[in-house]
Image (tube, rainbow, N blue to C red):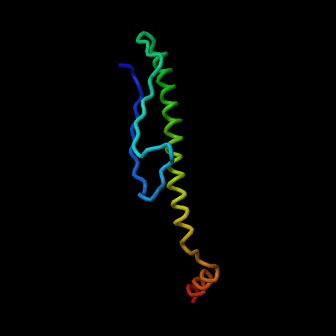
Amino acid sequence: MTPAVSITYELNPPSDTPAPEYLNTKKTHEFPVANTDASSQKAYYEGLRAAVLQAKSTLGEELTAWRDAVGRREDSKEAKIPKKSEEDEDDDEEAEEE
């Protein structure tokens, strides 16, 4: 069995969030560790480091795509909330002064 870094995630985005076209909410990745020569600890850790960096890059890209998909949905929700006008804020300040 070849040593590998294994990562599994399962996301639960809001049901009306459109999924990025190339991603699923549940995914497993295997990143094999290169240079697994038992006689050289340094070579093993170099291979392990490379696998971890590859895992970090892949997960970063996938999770950023999900963050963007959910973020666009949240932006549209925030746009619907009416913002307080400056007049309303001035009225609140005058009421507090009295």
Report the residue at 49% width, 39% height from top. 59
Q: Residue at x 45, y 15 (%)?
A: 41
Residue 22: image location, x then y, percent: 50, 43
Left-right relation of 89 to 47: right
The residue closer to the viewer here, 12 or 19, is 19
Give the residue furthest to the front: 21
In the rendered view, would you say 11 is above or below 88? above
Location of residue 75 by image quarter:
bottom right
How many marks do you count on the picture? 0
Q: Could you say which is closer to the camera, residue 17 or residue 3?
A: 17
Residue 88 in which image quadrant = bottom right
Q: Position of residue 11 (x, y in %)?
A: 41, 48
| Residue farthest bottom in this picture | 98
Return the residue nearer the eye: 95 or 85. 85
Name the residue at 47% across, 56% down: 17
Q: Residue furthest top?
A: 39
Query: At which x and y percent is residue 86?
Result: 64, 79
Q: Residue at x 49, y 15 (%)?
A: 43
**Which image quadrant is residue 80 in?**
bottom right
Which image quarter is the N terminus in? top left
Residue at the left extreme of this rendering: 1
Quadrant where the C terminus is found in the figure: bottom right
